Amino acid sequence: MQLDYDELPAGAAASLRDSLVGLLLHFARGSRPTRTQLCLALASLAAHLPAAEWGGGGCVQWLAARLSGEPSEAALPCMLELLTVLPQVRAARPPGRAWDVSARERRRRSSIAC
């Protein structure tokens, strides 16, 4: 997600966001590593999308509103995990800097060279 976001087709981010939230709720009571990876994917998506794409209030308000209609035993672990990983993902991308896309370019060149 961090490096390949710009390869998403135009308009696909909202669908991806909804799919990730659906999967997160599906695995809310399951494997914690799976839940963590889904939260990391959502947090990475949040780093790429402007607040307007999240309904104007930003990703935390959007996620809180989306999860508020779910049973608390599913919503609470998901929201807590999201609140844990969001700052970690944000800290990994300093203000004013884009994700390092050079890794993707090296990967493409190496696959072409094969």
Image (tube, rainbow, N blue to C red):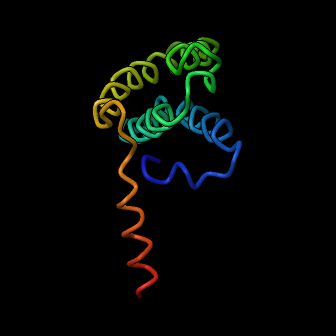
Residue at x-position 32% and y-position 25%: 87
- Residue 81 is left or right of residue 75, and the answer is left
Which image quarter holds the C terminus?
Answer: bottom left
Quadrant of residue 31 within the rendered picture: top left
Residue at x-position 35% and y-position 61%: 103
| Residue 62 placement (x, y as % from top left) | 58, 18
| Residue 24 placement (x, y as % from top left) | 52, 33
| Residue 92 placement (x, y as % from top left) | 29, 37
- Residue 39 is left or right of residue 58, and the answer is left
Tell me: residue 62, above or below residue 46: above
Pick the front one: 76 or 46: 46
Pick the front one: 32 or 103: 103
Residue at x-position 38% and y-position 25%: 81
Tell me: residue 105, above or below residue 59: below
Residue furthest to the bottom in view is 114
Residue at x-position 58% and y-position 32%: 21
- Residue 73 is left or right of residue 86, and the answer is right
| Residue 27 placement (x, y as % from top left) | 50, 35
Tell me: residue 109, above or below residue 56: below
Residue furthest to the front in view is 96
Q: What number of labels is visible? A: 0
Pick the front one: 44 or 23: 44
Pick the front one: 111 or 31: 111
Residue furthest to the right in view is 11
